[in-house]
Image: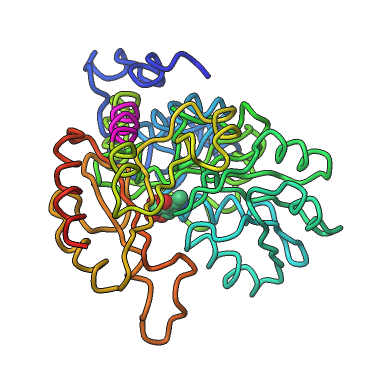
């Protein structure tokens, strides 16, 4: 990775181009002017590297692209209108009718829908495998497999895939490997340095970090980024607005600080939860009791703020009492912002016409934001008393 401090503070910014302003301007323009036909021609033949039209390229968005590429040790990056857009564009760029994708079990919900519903309509097959087993991945490879899709740690129960082994497996069989790296952010895990081909982010989470923008990112080689840009990105119209890009640039200024704060507080909350008799299990990849702790340590330098617990509750009513007694963790989807959040698995049980979630109803996922550890622990303590 390039120097982290320099990336977050300066990379991609050129004050001389904008009146020596400290903060880069928001170039809120849909299109850009040319003096000669030749200049316009040259630009159109290489739109990724010229400012023609903001659906393709915009100076404010480009600052963000450069920072994200550097953070992920990638040659280039694209910023998209959502994490889901980044996933869909990247996956679609690597498949055609008749191809087969191997994906880890229970990926992010809209990744699952992309693979199981949308792409099957276009003749793309998918197999889901145990994220913890490289042997199972190897066994799932067919002659038409083109893509290995990973999410490590995985959603909700945080299974870890051995990224170096997965990258080697993909290379050996000519597959493209891809990972959703939203959980760790590039502060704590850099898959491209371990041989993975494409990294995507829900930048809505840590990269922006303030709960006010929906945004995604794709980081990869120049070749893959250019291929995605010229096909999926431009045709589907996946760009974000310069305004939103500016908010994410601002969010990145504190990315390193925020990640370390969330991570340190999460460790303290984990220590409290593990000692509490109303908690059956705490799932946190960098806790020594986590089954894949040793592997996690070889590829993650931190964990961030996501913690899942299994409550020691005999009935659904006591789970409800706990959840509704919590005051400081807001009950909401998403995570990665300044504010602590929680989402109980019980939400996804007993929904009319929908199969129950495979995650037991005693599970609750917490996200630790930037608040003080004692402030959060005392809230958990009073709510646990209600079980
Ligand atoms: C939120 C999330 C996404 C989707 O990102 P959006 O920005 O909401 O489109 C993808 N993967 C993971 C792991 C997420 O948490």
Residue at horizontal 83 percent and vertical 39 percent from the top: 172
Residue 355 placement (x, y as % from top left): 47, 79
Residues 4 and 361: in front is 361
Furthest toward the right, the residue is: 143
Q: Residue 356 vs residue 291: left or right?
A: left
Residue at horizontal 41 percent and vertical 19 percent from the top: 7
Q: Residue 91, located in which quarter of the rendered image? A: bottom right
- Which segment did they paint magenta? 258-268
Q: Quadrant location of the C terminus? A: bottom left
Q: Residue 4 vs residue 261: left or right?
A: right
State the scheme by which the image is colored: rainbow
Residues 38 and 339: in front is 339
User: Does residue 238 appear anywhere in the picture?
Assistant: no
Q: Is residue 309 magenta-colored?
A: no
Q: Residue 122, located in which quarter of the rendered image? A: bottom right
Q: Is residue 26 above or below residue 230?
A: above
Residue at horizontal 17 percent and vertical 56 percent from the top: 385
Q: Main secondary structure of the magenta part?
A: helix
Q: How many marks?
A: 0
């Amino acid at each position: 990775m390039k120097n982290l401090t320099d990336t977050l503070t300066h990379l991609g910014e050129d004050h001389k181009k904008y009146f020596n302003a400290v903060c880069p301007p928001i170039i809120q323009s849909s299109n850009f002017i040319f003096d000669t036909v030749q200049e316009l021609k040259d630009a159109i033949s290489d739109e990724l590297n010229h400012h023609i039209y903001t659906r393709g390229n915009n100076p404010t968005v480009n600052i963000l692209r450069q920072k994200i590429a550097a953070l992920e040790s990638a040659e280039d990056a694209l910023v998209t209108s959502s994490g889901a857009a980044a996933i869909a564009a990247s996956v679609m760029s690597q498949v055609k009718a008749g191809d087969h994708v191997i994906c880890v079990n229970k990926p992010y919900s809209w990744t699952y829908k992309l693979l199981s519903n949308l792409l099957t309509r276009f003749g793309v097959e998918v197999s889901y495998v145990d994220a913890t087993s490289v042997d199972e991945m190897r066994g799932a490879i067919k002659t038409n497999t083109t893509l290995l899709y990973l999410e490590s740690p995985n959603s909700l129960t945080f299974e870890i895939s051995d990224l170096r082994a997965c990258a080697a497996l993909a290379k050996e069989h000519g597959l493209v490997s891809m990972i959703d790296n939203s959980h760790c952010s590039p502060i704590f895990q850099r898959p491209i340095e371990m041989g993975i081909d494409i990294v995507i982010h829900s930048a809505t989470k840590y990269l922006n970090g303030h709960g006010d923008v929906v945004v995604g990112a794709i980081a990869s080689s120049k070749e893959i980024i250019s291929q995605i840009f010229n096909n999926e990105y431009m045709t589907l119209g996946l760009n974000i607005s310069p305004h939103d890009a500016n908010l994410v640039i601002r969010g990145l200024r504190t990315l390193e600080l925020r990640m370390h704060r969330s991570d340190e507080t999460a460790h303290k909350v984990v220590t409290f939860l593990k000692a509490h008799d109303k908690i059956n299990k705490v799932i946190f990849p960098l806790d020594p009791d986590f089954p894949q702790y040793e592997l996690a340590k070889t590829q993650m330098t931190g964990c961030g703020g996501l913690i899942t617990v299994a409550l020691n509750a005999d009935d659904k009513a006591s789970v409800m009492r706990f959840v509704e007694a919590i005051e400081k963790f807001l009950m909401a989807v998403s995570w990665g912002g300044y504010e602590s959040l929680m989402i109980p698995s019980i939400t996804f049980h007993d929904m009319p016409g929908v199969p129950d979630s495979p995650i037991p109803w005693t599970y609750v996922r917490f996200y630790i934001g930037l608040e003080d550890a004692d402030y959060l622990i005392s809230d958990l303590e009073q709510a646990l008393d209600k079980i």
